[in-house]
Image: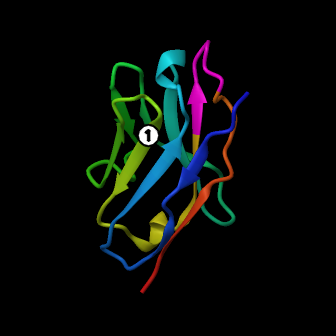
């Protein structure tokens, strides 16, 4: 298994934006679905978005319309563009792969997003 690497988190004011990156070189050639999850303090990990090898996307109700998942053409990195951020978006954000031949089927270290004024 290969651990994906998340980056791009930070402190942002309510209403602001951040773009998270999930580095998973070669994930496209492994036909991985890549998903973003988040875990707020004291809460269970929550799946919020995913992208499949064909570019199909899913979003949870909590982020739909505000977050956009995408991937680069090389099939190495998946992005999560987060707009109109709210205090309740504060969490550690993780990416993970899935699929029969996917080697990224393990959690990364995560990247912290804090939304606060």
Q: Is residue 117 above or below residue 104?
A: below
Q: Which residue is found at the position 62% from the left and 40% from the top?
A: 4
In the image, taking residue 111 as reference, residue 54 lies left or right, namely left
Residue segment shown in magenta: 96-103
In the image, taking residue 3 as reference, residue 64 lies left or right, namely left
> Where, quadrant-wise, is the N terminus in this rendering?
top right
**Main secondary structure of the magenta stretch:** loop
Q: Position of residue 81 (x, y in %)?
A: 34, 53
Q: Position of residue 63 (x, y in %)?
A: 37, 52
On whether residue 6 falls in the magenta region, the answer is no
Splitting the image into 4 quarters, where does residue 19 fall?
bottom left
In the image, taking residue 80 as reference, residue 91 lies left or right, namely right
Determine which residue is flagged by label 1: 78
Furthest-left residue in this view: 65
Q: Which residue is found at the position 44% from the left and 35% from the top?
A: 50
Q: Nearer the viewer, residue 68 or 23?
A: 23
Q: Nearer the viewer, residue 20 or 41?
A: 20
Q: Which residue is found at the position 29% from the left and 66% from the top?
A: 84
């Amino acid at each position: 298994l290969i651990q994906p690497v998340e980056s791009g988190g930070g402190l942002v004011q309510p209403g602001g934006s951040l773009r998270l990156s999930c580095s998973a070189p070669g994930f496209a050639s492994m036909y991985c679905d890549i998903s973003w999850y988040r875990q707020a303090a004291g809460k269970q990990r929550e799946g919020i978005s995913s992208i499949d090898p064909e570019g199909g996307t899913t979003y949870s109700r909590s982020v739909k319309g505000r977050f956009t998942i995408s991937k680069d053409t090389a099939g190495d990195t998946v992005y999560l563009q987060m707009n109109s951020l709210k205090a309740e978006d504060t969490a550690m954000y993780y990416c993970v792969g899935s699929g029969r031949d996917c080697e990224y089927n393990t959690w990364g270290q995560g990247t912290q997003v804090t939304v606060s004024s």
